[in-house]
Image (cartoon, rainbow, N blue to C red):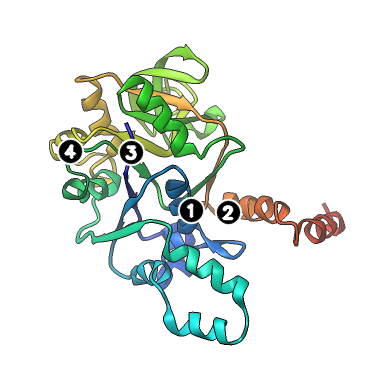
Amino acid sequence: MRIRKAVIPAAGFGTRFLPFTKAVPKELVPLIDKPTLQYVVEEAAESGITDILIVTSVGKDAIQNHFNPNFELETRLRETGKLELLSELEKINKLADIHYIHQQELNGLGGAILQAKSFVGDEPFAVLLGDTVTTSDAAPVISQLVSVFDEKDSPVVALERVPMEKVSRYGVIDGDDNGNGLHRVRKFVEKPSIEEAPSNLVIASRYVFTPDLFEFLENTKKGKGNEIQLTDAMSAMLNARAMYGFEFNGARHDIGNKLEFVKSTILFALRRDGLKQQITEFIKTLPL
């Protein structure tokens, strides 16, 4: 089944990047010259998704401004012959049909996704976190999950393995290994201690859900941080139907984390033909 719709939660304050995020949404933190959120939207579009709902909150008007046409700027680029830059801007305008909803009260990831109920309707849908970029030498990560969904006709989450000392930062799964990176989930655990963690397989910011998720979100009480935890709703959903996790081909880049942001900036610079040599030479000069 083709997945047409995606939800991108982008409503958090971005406190880990203050003071920068006092005025600029964390989802617009750039990797080189492109905002994080644009990479996320491009991943969805490249996976065949045509309708995207971005869940925003107060102070995030810049997100909508980024994806809307800027006729004055585009006219200026055309008049000055900067046609390559003009082409880049025009591509942004045509990525997908992008819709927005303003979340009045921040209620965690589960609360943000719940805002998308009417947008999703009765269709399966993807969720991509707006502060996390993924890369892959194969198909885009969300497209890989859609392939699993098509095979299993069940919700599926992206998985990656992390060192055990980092499991407390993530939702973790306990599951049965079905081979080729596929796991049938037995249990979800939100941010466990090392002692409580059933594995080092963590949920990696990409999901494909069936629309019945909303029933479970609506019946989920506030959990850790006094927020509606998506993992709690997924745990309830697991009692009603099969769910899977997939160790995707690729890498996750958490741009909301300062250290990972710096690492990712270097990695993306090394992938740019116009920057690779200069960055490599600069790194060699550092007093390491």
15 sits left or right of 285 in the view: left
Front position among marks 3 and 1: 3
Q: Is residue 69 above or below residue 239?
A: below
At label 2, the amino acid type is Phe
Task: List x then y, in percent, for residue 273.
Answer: 75, 57
2 sits left or right of 263 in the view: left
At label 1, the amino acid type is Gly
Measuring 50% from the left and 25% from the top, which residue is drawn there?
200
- What is the C-alpha distance between the residues marked 4 and 1? 32 Å
Task: List x then y, in percent, for residue 158.
Answer: 44, 32
Cβ atoms under marks 4 and 2 closer than 8 Å: no
Q: Residues within 10 Å of mark 3 (few under 14, many from 20)?
A: many
Q: Nearer the viewer, residue 215 or 235?
A: 215
- What is the C-alpha distance between the residues marked 3 and 4? 12 Å
Q: Which residue is mark 1?
A: 256
Q: For residue 261, which numbered disc appears in the image?
A: 2
Q: For residue 122, which numbered disc appears in the image?
A: 4
Front position among marks 3 and 2: 3
Asked which quadrant contains residue 216, the reply is top left
